[in-house]
Amino acid sequence: MALSYSNLGLFLFNHMSVIKISEYNPYYKPYIEATNKDLGIVEGLKQNLDDMVSFYSNIPQGKHSYAYAEGKWTIKDILLHTIDTERVFAYRALRISRQDKTPLAGFEQDDYVVHANAEKRTMDSLLEEYRAVRQATITLFSSFDTDTLLFIGEASGFPVSVRAIGYIIMGHENHHLEIINERYV
């Protein structure tokens, strides 16, 4: 497949650069390591979209509201948490890409889950929302040029680059898929 001149730089950048530890909070290192950086951000987001929808679609309905222990999230809680987290991180990427220097606050994931009402929703409605959020994230990251991907802002008291955010989004959902495979299904 031939690459246009405008896409060539992004292709090379995504495939040849190593994300430096100075580009993200060390807490996110396992997420970044849990991604296939050879695909690049946009292709990785697209691949994860297909993988996630297939994975969740194949979980038996009787498991959707299952939690492996008291006080643990259900599978539907985990999916909605993944959606909410992607929204927060995509918003961070947008703000940083526009050179907004305002430090961005963290968020309390447990509060989000408690108030998200995932149990009142069907898996189909959650997957529809996931697809919509992911398409928006893909469109956002597709708009970034190679310079923009290197922009660094502050989130939760740590520096973070736009490109690190893309990989954190993917690695975060990969992390939760691993947990579901180990403890839920």
Image (cartoon, rainbow, N blue to C red):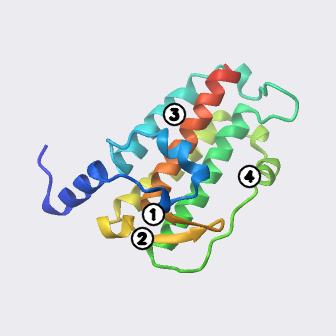
- Label 2's element? loop
Distance from the alpha carbon under mark 3 to that under mark 1: 25 Å
Distance from the alpha carbon under mark 4 to that under mark 3: 22 Å
Dot 1 or dot 2, earlier in sequence: 2
Dot 4 or dot 3, earlier in sequence: 3
Q: Which residue is under mark 4?
A: 109
Distance from the alpha carbon under mark 1 to that under mark 2: 6 Å
Dot 2 or dot 3, earlier in sequence: 3
- Quadrant of the frame with the C terminus: top right
Q: Which residue is under mark 3?
A: 53
Q: Position of residue 49 (x, y in %)?
A: 46, 40
Q: Position of residue 184 (x, y in %)?
A: 70, 23
Would you say 143 lies left or right of 91 here?
left
Dot 3 or dot 1, earlier in sequence: 3
Residues marked 3 and 1 touching at CB (< 8 Å):
no
Residue ID at (59%, 80%): 102
Q: Amino acid at mark 3?
A: Val
- Label 3's element? helix
Would you say 84 lies left or right of 174 here?
right
Residue ID at (14%, 57%): 4
Q: Which residue is under mark 2?
A: 151
Residues marked 1 and 4 touching at CB (< 8 Å):
no
The image's mark for residue 162 is 1
Q: Amino acid at mark 1?
A: Val
Q: Amino acid at mark 4?
A: Gln
Camera-side residue: 13 or 78? 13
Distance from the alpha carbon under mark 2 to that under mark 4: 26 Å
